[in-house]
Image (cartoon, helix red, strand yellow):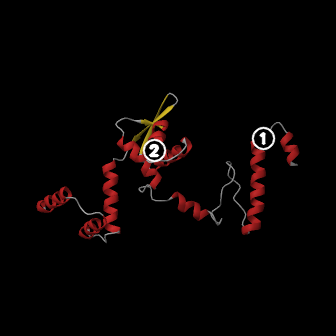
């Protein structure tokens, strides 16, 4: 049966025909490029089999550490953490663009918000046609984690070395020195 006769047949869904065409084209390209045939049993369409060269790369991408934030995600979270109320997408876009001198569009910020929800840093709920975002991780908890990581990684797990490096880059103010002295005296 030809693709044209399949397309004309009323019993066959047009989308299934389109997907089968895409699968056939992709199989042909991939078998020429890699000498590998795809697993085409998937109803959804294109799916890489475990032997496909891109399979491990996709798996690595999916298993990234979900506890670290990208710089852009940190900017979005900073706006949310500093707000007293739950924010909507337009609020967050305006906050990031104004505060950090960005020109991000709503779709860009929406992508970051979706990632933050997947990473369990945010939760969202819908009220009417509007989504509201709430932090699940506090700014203090995330900041503590980042400071601990800096001390362990950059300071070779030596907080004293880290303080000296900080003082070299930006001299400590007298009030900061007093806080450090108080902390040392408590130990």
Residue at 74%, 58% (x, y): give it: 26
Q: Between residues 128 and 104, which one lies in front from this camera angle?
A: 104
Toward which corner of the image does residue 6 lie, by quadrant? top right
**Residue sitting at 58 percent across and 60 percent down?**
58
Looking at the picture, how far across and down is residue 167, in whole percent?
Answer: 26, 66
**CA distance for labels 1 and 2:** 43 Å
Residue drawn at x 75%, y 52% is: 22
**Residue that lies at the very extreme toward the left in this rendered image:** 185
Image quarter (top left, top right, bottom left or bottom right) of the C terminus:
bottom left
Residue 59 locus on image (x, y percent):
55, 60
Circle 2 sits in a helix, a strand or a loop, which is it? helix
Of labels 1 and 2, the one closer to you = 2
Question: Which mark identifies residue 104?
Answer: none
35 vs 117: above or below: below
- Which labelled disc corresponds to residue 96? 2
| 151, above or below 62, in the image | below
Q: Nearer the viewer, residue 90 or 48?
A: 90
Where residue 60 appears, as percent x and y from the top left, is 53, 62
Q: Which residue is mark 1?
A: 14
User: Which is nearer the N-term, disc 1 or disc 2?
Assistant: 1
Q: Secondary structure at mark 1?
A: helix
Q: Is residue 168 left or right of residue 8?
A: left
Q: Count the labels in the image.
A: 2
| Residue drawn 78% across the image and 41% down it | 14
The answer to whether residue 118 shows anywhere in this view is yes
In the foreground, 38 or 125:
125
Tag 1: Cα neighbours inside 10 Å, few (<14), some, or many (≥20)?
Answer: some
Q: Nearer the viewer, residue 94 or 9?
A: 94
Q: Relative to 106, is 54 on the left or the right? A: right
- Residue 135 in view (yes/no): no
Q: Residue furthest top?
A: 128
Quadrant in which residue 169 is drawn: bottom left
């Amino acid at each position: 049966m030809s693709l044209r006769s399949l397309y004309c047949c009323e019993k066959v869904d047009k989308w299934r025909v389109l997907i089968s065409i895409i699968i056939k084209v992709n199989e042909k390209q991939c078998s020429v490029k890699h000498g590998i045939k795809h697993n085409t049993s998937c109803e959804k369409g294109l799916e890489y089999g475990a032997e496909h060269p891109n399979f491990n790369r996709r798996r690595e991408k999916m298993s990234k550490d979900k506890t670290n934030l990208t710089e852009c995600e940190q900017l979005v979270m900073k706006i949310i953490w500093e707000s007293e109320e739950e924010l909507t997408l337009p609020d967050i876009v305006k906050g990031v663009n104004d505060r950090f001198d960005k020109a991000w569009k709503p779709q860009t910020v929406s992508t970051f918000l979706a990632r933050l929800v997947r990473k369990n840093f945010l939760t969202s709920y819908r009220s009417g046609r509007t989504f509201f975002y709430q932090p699940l991780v506090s700014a203090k908890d995330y900041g503590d984690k980042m400071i601990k990581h800096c001390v362990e990684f950059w300071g070779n797990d030596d907080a004293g070395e880290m303080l000296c490096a900080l003082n070299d880059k930006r001299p400590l103010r007298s009030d900061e020195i007093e806080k450090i002295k108080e902390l040392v005296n408590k130990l």
